[in-house]
Every structure is written in structure tokens, then in C-alpha cells.
């Protein structure tokens, strides 16, 4: 099995953890040409695999799937009860002046422009994101994003709403930010949860696939373009 087809970070009898590439759907679409997805790739070799959570097509990084009904129920519970720890890495447009912050803006689907989301204080669902600056460059910032809730497009929308859309975001970024990267600069870097059967705490990390990486002298607070 080639790494390109399926990159496995961990597997046992109950769960499988994979590294999803950017541009691959988490679950298959309705049309035949959108059948290829992380779910269908895993199920082609492990037919009992069940989806627990999703990443946007353009987002790369860690995904976990359950291999039994019992594990599926327990993993769903952990996500529902917000017991799963998630950490993303991202490149945001412009210089974020503060070092840390929290965005608390409710989100709802923007039906006329779906699948886009929008902020709605009347009907939107609670959405909370913590962010921390890792490094700054003249026109973009390397940030760590920790979502407390798991709304669709939450990280993309929240960064846009504070004036720093993600580079390469073809839904929410203005032209300058969109053209600074070939793909959405959002990566699900780390996932922490308890094993659904043993209860043992587990953490998985997917090496960053962002187009920009920290320079060797990372302490200087600058990034370098590695494209």
C-alpha cells in the first residue's frame, strides 16, 4: 500500500488514525467523480471502518476512524462531550499583534452561499477558538489554533472575522491572502483522546504539510518560504 494512497499513523483492532492530505474529501460526495475520500480509502482495506469526525477537503492532518460499533459509539461520545483535544497549525494573513487570544462568535450555514458559513448571533451555534502566535513575518503570521467547539469552517471563519484570513483559503480570503499559497494553509497537527476500549490517553501528530515552515533560527520570530 503506497503512502500516497493511505498514510497510517496508528492502527489496532478498534481504531485507525490517518494523515489526510489536502485536497482529499473526508467522506465521499454524491457524484461519482467525488467518490474518492479518506473514508472510502480506509474502507477499501478495512471494510468495518466508520467515520468519527471530518476535516475540510482543503485541510490536511490527523483523522481517527473507528473499526467497531462499540468504538464508534465511544469516539462519537468523546467528540460530542468535547473530551477530544485538537490542535491546528495555520498561516494567517497579516501580522497578528497580540500573542494569544480567543474568538467566540456563533456560526450558522450561509444557505444562499453554501457551503460557506457566517456569524449569526440570533440563530448561530456556539463556536470558540483559542489562538497563539508561533512566529511572525512581514505579511503573515504562523499560529496555533485550538478549537473548543467543532463547527464547520470554524477556524477559517474565526480567523477571517478577526481580520486575518488563512492563506490560500478560496472561500474566505481576499485576493492577496488567497494567492500567497497554493492551498489552504490549515493543518490538523495534533489529536488527543482516550482509547475507546482501554481508556488509555493517546496523542497523535501529523507532520506539518504547510507550504511555509519555521526558519532554522525560529527564535527570531520569522518564517521562511519553502516552496
Image (cartoon, helix red, strand yellow):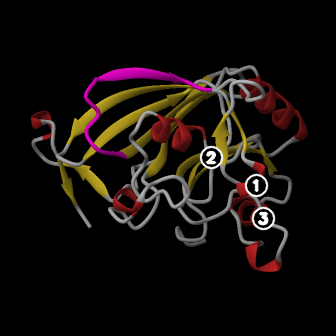
Measured in 3D between alpha carbons, the distance from the residue under mark 1 to the one under mark 3, in whole angstroms, is: 23 Å
Q: Nearer the viewer, residue 100 or 61?
A: 100
Query: Looking at the image, which residue is at 53% across and 71% down?
Result: 4
Query: Looking at the image, which residue is at 32% across and 62% down?
Result: 180
Q: Which residue is mark 2?
A: 63
Question: Magenta segment range?
Answer: 92-105
Q: Position of residue 38 (x, y in %)?
A: 68, 60
Q: Secondary structure at mark 3?
A: loop
Q: Which residue is mark 1?
A: 112
**For residue 192, side relative to residue 226 (left or right):** right
Q: Are marks 1 and 2 in contact (CB under 8 Å)?
A: no
Q: Secondary structure at mark 1?
A: helix
Q: Position of residue 132 (x, y in %)?
A: 36, 27
Quarter of the image for the C terminus: give it. bottom left
Give the crowd class for mark 3: few <14, some 14-19, many >=20 residues within 10 Å.
Answer: some
Q: Which residue is mark 3?
A: 28
Q: Are marks 1 and 3 in contact (CB under 8 Å)?
A: no
Number of the label disc, if any, that sits on residue 165: none
Answer whether residue 48 is magenta in the image: no
Amino acid at each position: 500500500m503506497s503512502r500516497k494512497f493511505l498514510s497510517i499513523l496508528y492502527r489496532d483492532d478498534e481504531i485507525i488514525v490517518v494523515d489526510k492530505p489536502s485536497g482529499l474529501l473526508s467522506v465521499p460526495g454524491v457524484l461519482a467523480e467525488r467518490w474518492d475520500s479518506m473514508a472510502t480509502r480506509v474502507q477499501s482495506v478495512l471494510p468495518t471502518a466508520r467515520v468519527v469526525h471530518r476535516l475540510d477537503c482543503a485541510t490536511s492532518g490527523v483523522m481517527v476512524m473507528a473499526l467497531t460499533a462499540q468504538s464508534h459509539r465511544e469516539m462519537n461520545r468523546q467528540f460530542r462531550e468535547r473530551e477530544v483535544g485538537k490542535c491546528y497549525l495555520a498561516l494567517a494573513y497579516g501580522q497578528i499583534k497580540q500573542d494569544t487570544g480567543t474568538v467566540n462568535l456563533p456560526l450558522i450555514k450561509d444557505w444562499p452561499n453554501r457551503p460557506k458559513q457566517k456569524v449569526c448571533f440570533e440563530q448561530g451555534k456556539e463556536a470558540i477558538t483559542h489562538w497563539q502566535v508561533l512566529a511572525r513575518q512581514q505579511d503573515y503570521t504562523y499560529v496555533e489554533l485550538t478549537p473548543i467547539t467543532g463547527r464547520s469552517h470554524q477556524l477559517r471563519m474565526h480567523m477571517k472575522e478577526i481580520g486575518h484570513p488563512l492563506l490560500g483559503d478560496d472561500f474566505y480570503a481576499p485576493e492577496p491572502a488567497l494567492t500567497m499559497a497554493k492551498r489552504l494553509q490549515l493543518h490538523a497537527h495534533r489529536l488527543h483522546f482516550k482509547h475507546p476500549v482501554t481508556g488509555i490517553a493517546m496523542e497523535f501528530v501529523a507532520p506539518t504539510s504547510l507550504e511555509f515552515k519555521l526558519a532554522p533560527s525560529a527564535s527570531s520570530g520569522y518564517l521562511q518560504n519553502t516552496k
